[in-house]
Amino acid sequence: MTPTWFDPDRQHPRRRRWLAHLSAALVVLGLAGCRVTTSAAIDTLAARIPAEGTSGTLDVGTWNLEWFGDANNGPTNDSLQLATAASAIQAMDLDIMGLQEIVSASQFAELDARLPNHVGILASAPQVTGGAAAYSAGEQKLAILYKPRVATLLGARVVLANVSADFAGRPPLELSFRVSTGGTTRDVVVLVVHMKAFTDLDSWQRRVNAAEALKLYLDQTYPTQRVIVIGDFNDDLDASISGGRLSPYANFIADVPRYAFPTALLSLSRIPTTVGFADAVDHHLATNEMMQDYVAASAHVVRLDRYITGYGTITSDHYPVVTSYR
C-alpha cells in the first residue's frame, strides 16, 4: 500500500545522476583505476574479497544496497550493481545479511538466484505477514538473506506498521530463526530496520519516535529472548548527526542491563559506514541475552571499495557492517 504522505527518503536520489553515469562509463572503459571492475573481473570478484564468516560463529551483516534495482535513482547500471553485490555477498559468506533499499522485487529475486547458499526474503513477499500491506512495488523495501544450513526460518512479519511514518514508511521486518552453530541450537529473533534519513529536526524527531516505539515493542514482546536489530539507523550513537543533538537511540544506550550496540565501537573510533560521510550510521543492536554470545570487538565495516573500483557509484553509498556471535 502506498502511503498518502510524501517522504523524500523514498523518493529523492542521493547523488547526481551524471556522476553515476560517468563512473559506470569509466568502469566499462577500464579507466576507473587499477582495480578495474569489468564484466570479466566481476566473475573473479568473489575470490578477491576475503570471507567474513566462520564455521564456529553466527556471522551477521547489514548492508544498504542503495536504491537496488531502481531505474531512476542510485547507481545507473542496475546489472552492474546486481553483479557486484552478488559477488560481494557470496565472498563475505555471512550467515544472515539484512538489506535495505531493495526497490525491484525481480532484481532481488535474481540476486537470490545467484546465491545458492542463501535464501532471500523480501518484506513484501507473501510469506511475510503484513508485508504486502506495508510495502508497495516501487518503493524501498527491507530484505534478508540467510543460510538454511545454519538458520531455520520459524516466521516472518512486518511489525510496528501502526507507526510507519516514524520509520519513513519502512516499518521493521522481523524474522524468527532457529540457529545452529558450533554444536549449539538457539532461537534468535532478527529485525531489519531502515530509519528516517536527513539531519533536520523533523527527521531527528521521527528517529527518536521510532526508537521509542521499537524499544517499547522489544521490552514487551521479547523481554528474555535473543534479539538483534540490524540496519541503516541513519544516525550515530555517541551524538546525533543532527545539529549536535543527543543520539535518537539514547533510550537504548541508557538501558545498559537490557541492550547494547556492539557497533558503538565504530562510533567511538570514528569509523564511517558510508562512502561520503564520517559518521557510523549503520548499526547492530542486541539484547543482553544476545550479547552473552557476542564475539568481543567483532563489529567491523567491510570496505568493499578496496576491491570494487568506483564502488560508491556502481554498487552502494553504504558499506556492509558485520558482527559475530558464538
Image (cartoon, rainbow, N blue to C red):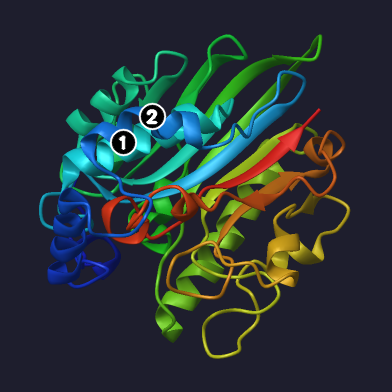
Instruction: Give residue 81's position: percent from left, percent from top.
Output: 26, 44
Corner quadrant of residue 181: top right
Q: Is mark 2 on a helix, strand or loop?
A: helix
Looking at the rendered image, the quarter that the N terminus falls into is: top left
Q: In this view, does 256 lie to the left or right of 115?
A: right
Instruction: Give residue 164's position: percent from left, percent from top.
Output: 38, 54
Corner quadrant of residue 194: bottom left
Q: Which amino acid does label 2 sit on?
A: Thr
Residue 322 in sight here? yes
Q: Give me the residue at 23% from left, 59% from top.
A: 31
Corner quadrant of residue 85: top left
Q: Which mark is residue 60?
A: none
Residue 144 in sight here? no
> Where is 264 relative to 71, above or below?
below
> Where is 278 relative to 32, above or below?
below
User: Cβ–Cβ below 8 Å for labels 1 and 2?
Assistant: yes
Q: Give me the residue at 43% from left, 72% from top.
A: 276
Camera-side residue: 163 or 199?
199
Q: What residue type is labelled 1?
A: Ala
Q: In this view, does 284 lie to the left or right of 148?
A: right
Looking at the rendered image, the quarter that the C terminus falls into is: top right
Q: Which mark is residue 41?
A: 1
Q: Which mark is residue 44?
A: 2
